[in-house]
Image (cartoon, rainbow, N blue to C red):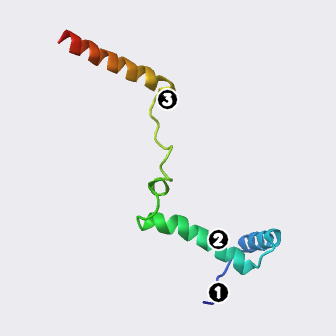
Amino acid sequence: MPMTVRLSARTERAVNALARRRRQTRSDVVRDALDHYTAINGAAAAGRGRPYHAWLDVIGVVSSGAGDRSRTTGELFTAIVREKARARRAG
């Protein structure tokens, strides 16, 4: 279906350059870009797709406070298991 879209001069230059590099028409470049955009945003907005894509904008935003948590997790888990084993033996 034909469609007319007004682009800024900067965006038009970028589309033209990308079309030359890919040896595609400008229409092909715009179609590919829209397909990519709707695949990412359309699926996440509609609740479809993988959960990772739905949370992509918040992953890595929250700080746990401790920078070495991944290194000490095994040690902490081992300590918890040992403590529970001691409590069972003592109880």
Packing grade of label 3 (10 A; few <14, some 14-19, many >=20) is few
Residue 26, image x and y in percent?
74, 78
Check disc 3 and give the amino acid type.
Answer: Ser
Q: Which element type, helix, strand or loop, lies under badge 2?
A: helix
Q: Alpha carbon of mark 1 to alpha carbon of mark 2: how far?
A: 15 Å
In this rendering, would 68 be left or right of 86? right
Mark 1 or mark 2: name the one nearer the start of the chain. 1
In this rendering, would 81 be left or right of 19? left
Q: Alpha carbon of mark 2 to alpha carbon of mark 3: how far?
A: 38 Å
* Residue holding disc 2: 33
Q: Residue at x 44, y 20 (%)?
A: 75
Camera-side residue: 25 or 11?
Answer: 25
Q: Residue at x 49, y 57 (%)?
A: 53
- In the displayed orientation, state which residue is furthest to the top: 90
Residue 85, image x and y in percent?
28, 16
* Residue holding disc 1: 4
Q: Nearer the viewer, mark 1 or mark 3?
A: 3
Packing grade of label 2 (10 A; few <14, some 14-19, many >=20) is few
Mark 1 or mark 3: name the one nearer the start of the chain. 1
* Residue holding disc 3: 70
Check disc 1 and give the amino acid type.
Answer: Thr
Q: Residue at x 49, y 47 (%)?
A: 59
Mark 2 or mark 3: name the one nearer the start of the chain. 2
Q: Residue at x 60, y 89 (%)?
A: 1
Q: Which element type, helix, strand or loop, lies under badge 3?
A: helix
Check disc 2 and give the amino acid type.
Answer: Ala
Camera-side residue: 76 or 66?
Answer: 76
Packing grade of label 1 (10 A; few <14, some 14-19, many >=20) is few
